[in-house]
Image: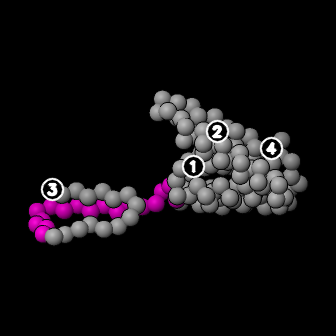
Amino acid sequence: MLVEALLALAAAGGGAIVQAAGTDAWYGVRSNIARVLGRGEESRERGELERLDQTQAALDAATEGEIERIQTAQAAVWQNRLETLLEELPEVQRQQVAAELRAVIKHASAANNEQAVRNDFSGSTFEKSAVQGSGTQHNTFN
């Protein structure tokens, strides 16, 4: 039986997988989760990559009315896979995998929380101007 902290870690991992799907962080999270679950076995890792691709496909195919249900279901699937892995490992390996999983979650969280640039202009006159950048931009012209 896993301790509460590891159960919470598995839940956070499942959530991170679902939240990363369809974002710029997806391929990093996808490959790292497959590596963690594959435990050095190439065929196992390929199988995990296929499962992760199925998760992304299910999320991509979801309609607006069913997306929340599918996200919850997919997060639970991955939580269960991570719990099973952690439960099966000897304590030393369990701590190593937990550290790897924390790093993946941190990466996914950082990618989802990238800071947006906000430009607010008040009482300004612009001629032949452009606002350039990438990512999410919010420009307010008052």
The residue where tag 3 is placed is 142
Question: Mark 3 or mark 1: which is in front?
Answer: 1
> Real-space Cα distance between discs 4 and 3?
55 Å
Q: Answer yes or no: is residue 114 visible.
A: yes
Name the N-terminal-most of marks 3 and 1.
1
Q: Are marks 1 and 2 in contact (CB under 8 Å)?
A: yes
Name the N-terminal-most of marks 4 and 2.
2
SS under mark 1: loop
Label 2 crowd bin: few (<14), some (14–19), many (20+), radius 10 Å = many
SS under mark 4: helix
The x, y position of residue 8, in whole percent, is 68, 45
Q: Are marks 4 and 2 in contact (CB under 8 Å)?
A: no
The residue where tag 2 is placed is 74
Q: Are marks 3 and 1 in contact (CB under 8 Å)?
A: no
Specify how the rendered protein is coloured: one colour
The kind of residue on which mark 3 rests is Asn
The x, y position of residue 50, in whole percent, is 71, 48
The residue where tag 1 is placed is 21
Residue 124 lies left or right of residue 62; in this view the side is left
Q: Do the residues labelled 3 and 2 touch (CB within 8 Å)?
A: no
Say which quarter of the image contains residue 103. bottom right
> Real-space Cα distance between discs 1 and 4?
22 Å
The kind of residue on which mark 4 rests is Thr
Magenta span of residues: 111-127
Label 4 crowd bin: few (<14), some (14–19), many (20+), radius 10 Å = some
The N terminus lies in which quarter of the figure?
Answer: top right
The x, y position of residue 12, in whole percent, is 64, 47
> Real-space Cα distance between discs 4 and 2?
15 Å
Tell me which residue sits at (82%, 59%) in the image.
Answer: 42
